[in-house]
Image: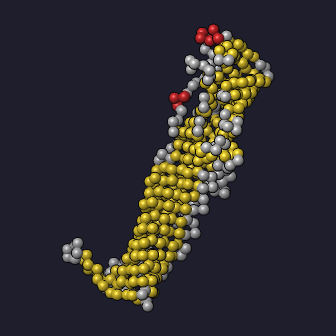
Amino acid sequence: MRVIAQPSARVDSSKLITVVLERANEVAGGEFVDSTVVPPYREDTRSAVGNVLFRETTTAVECDTAVQFLLSRKIRVVGNVRIARDSVLITGYEGFYFPDERRSELRKDVALTDTKVYLSSERGVYYANDQRAVFSQDVVLQDSLNVVLADSLVYFRRDARSVIVGKVRILNAADNVRIKGGYAEHFNARNYSFIQEDPVMIKIDSTSQGTVDTLTIRALRMDSFRSEKDSVPRIVIKDSVRIRRGELAAKSTNAVYRLKDQKIILYGRPIVWYEGSQLTGDSIVVQIKEQNKKNRIDKVFIYRNAFLVSKDSLDKSGKKFSQVSGNDMVITFDSTSKILRADVYKQALSLYYAYDGTKPRGANVSSGDGLSIFFEDNRVKKIIFRGDVEGEQYPERLLGRKDLNLPGFQWRISEKPNE
């Protein structure tokens, strides 16, 4: 059966799209009456029931039942709705199709698929002429690498770009990273996103001990670069960076998280706390290592003005800190992520406190071209100096009269991020 919708005589039919009802089990004429207005609004309609197919120049509309409004030209569609144009398919339970504007408005289990993305929500509007989709309520967008969740989303097909608002979450299964915030833009063709309004990056890992550990990074903005054209897939983290992972906490002005080699680069007054130790320098790199499919902190590299401070665990006064400084420093962790050793390069200085069992025996201040410190249970076990070594020993009775802290010493525990 082929029924062509004819507009009212009051409409200039030369400007309208011809819509053909190609298929239906039953067709009947009728009238729509809106009694909420005075005088009541009336419009002729045509109803189609069962296996319905409308077609216009570029679009096919299928559904279980439909009502065609002959004056306003909209089509009410209900049940198993499918609207196809070129490579775009829109599905849903019910809604309207406006052929002259090539606009679809659907509700309940709405989905849009094309060659680039799959988009779903409870409400969706698609403007075919503009190639623009506006989806809201429980929105999900999926492309080749990412899943995006949000309250609302505008998808621009020409640019393969999405503007995402409200409870935004961007998930990447390949590296188990998720970023959430209040606003984002996602460019799926480039595999690039930026997210702002209190963004938080979360990566859930298993530790070498088999427990679950979570890396959490907060800042004011995050830019994610994951394209194959990017030489280093990374997340660029901007402004007021705060990091937590188990016993590790850090802060800096900016940071970069390199995804393939698992490096976190901190710059702009960076500082790292780990258990009872504090690390500072001009820039700091935290290296995470995967071992037997579990992740742990492997090394921390401190470049320029390197300074390591460790709270003395045997000191009851809380005023004694082991200290190491130098141009550059590398901190190495053991398989349980405890500090194993510290290697200092150029202009090395050290201050550590000696004990006979638990009885304090004074302090030692030494310098050299370089040094290596070996730790056990976060306490200095052995120090090896290299080149032009000088040192002084201070007995315990004199420590209260002398400030032994190394130049540049600061204990900044009050700045440590709590989340």
Along the viewing direction, whichever of 144 and 186 lies nearer the viewer: 144
Q: Residue furthest left?
A: 38
Residue drawn 70% across the image and 36% down it: 334
User: Quick check: can you spot residue 346?
Assistant: no
Along the viewing direction, whichever of 166 and 231 lies nearer the viewer: 166
In the displayed structure, 229 sits above or below 419; it is: below
Residue drawn 43% across the image and 90% down it: 2
Residue drawn 45% across the image and 75% down it: 81
Q: Where is residue 135 in the image (x, y as percent from the top left)?
A: 45, 63
Q: Where is residue 354 in the image (x, y as percent from the top left)?
A: 68, 17
Q: Residue furthest right?
A: 387
In the displayed structure, 259 sits above or below 44; it is: above
The answer to which quarter of the image holds residue 109 is: bottom left
Q: Where is residue 185 in the image (x, y as percent from the top left)?
A: 51, 55
Residue drawn 25% across the image and 75% down it: 34
Along the viewing direction, whichever of 313 and 133 lies nearer the viewer: 313
Tell me if 43 is positioned left or right of 409 in this view.
Answer: left
User: Quick check: can you spot residue 333?
Assistant: yes
Tell me if 79 is positioned left or right of 291 in this view.
Answer: left
Q: Which residue lies furthest to the bottom in this view?
A: 1
The answer to which quarter of the image holds residue 340 is: top right
Q: Where is residue 66 in the image (x, y as percent from the top left)?
A: 39, 80
In the displayed structure, 291 sits above or below 350; it is: below
The image's colour scheme reads secondary structure
Give the mark count.
0
The quarter of the rendered structure image containing the N terminus is: bottom left
